[in-house]
Every structure is written in structure tokens, then in C-alpha cells.
Amino acid sequence: TDTWVGTLSVPGLEFDVSRPTLEGIVSKTVRAPRGAKRARVTYTVSARDEVDGSVPVSCRPRSGSRFRIGRTVVNCSATDSSGNTATARFTIIVKRRR
């Protein structure tokens, strides 16, 4: 069995091996309306890739969802056209209004 080591160079072809960068990944605390068990929470997360520019981000639970009292972890991911994926998570804390 032969083992070859080398570099592949194709003029005009660029290999994208870097994943997108997620921005806006910030934990936050909000107060629920008086007597409520949930609060609507909005947040903004974006992603930028060196080759593709802006790429779509998917977060669960989504921004604008009703979060229950307590801590909820939000998981976000973005994938560029080369299949490189970035993931991040942050926490939303909903407190009761006193």
C-alpha cells in the first residue's frame, strides 16, 4: 500500500473550511407580567461567513416565543454553503414580577 502526501492546487477554486461567526449570543433576564407563568422574549442572533457573507441562523426556542418562569437554554446554529456549521447557546431567565 502506498501513502501519498501533497497539496492539491486548482486555479480558481477556493476551499471554504471556516465556519460562520455567530453574533448576538447574549444571555438575558426578563420579568414576566404580573400573574403570568410565561413571558414573550425576543432576541436577535445573526451569522456572518468569510466567503458567503450573511447566512441564516436557526434558534430553538425561536425569538418571540413564550418562555416559562425559570431558565431556558436557547440553541442556535448557522451553516454556510460549504457545509461548515457554527453552534452556540445562551440562557434566557424569566423571573416573576414582585
Image (cartoon, rainbow, N blue to C red):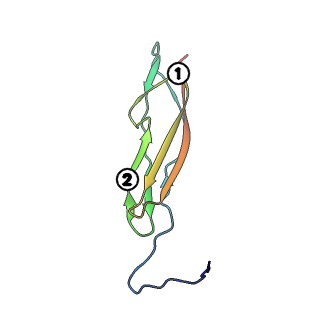
Query: Real-space Cα distance between discs 2 and 1?
Result: 29 Å
* x and y percentages locating residue 40 in the rendered image: 41, 28
Can residue 31 be seen here? The reply is yes
- Label 2 or label 1, whichever lies nearer to me, is 2
Q: Residues within 10 Å of mark 1 (few under 14, many from 20)?
A: some
Sequence-wise first label, 2 or 1: 2
Name the quadrant of the C terminus: top right
Relative to 63, 95 lies left or right:
right
Q: CB of mark 2 within 8 Å of CB of mark 1?
A: no
Q: Which residue is the site of mark 2?
A: 56
- Residue 12 lies, with reference to residue 79, above or below; the image says below
* x and y percentages locating residue 91 in the rendered image: 56, 36
Q: Which residue is the site of mark 1?
A: 69
Disc 2 secondary structure class:
loop
Disc 1 secondary structure class:
loop
- Residue 89 lies, with reference to residue 50, above or below; the image says above
Q: Quadrant of residue 3?
A: bottom right
* x and y percentages locating residue 6 in the rendered image: 58, 84
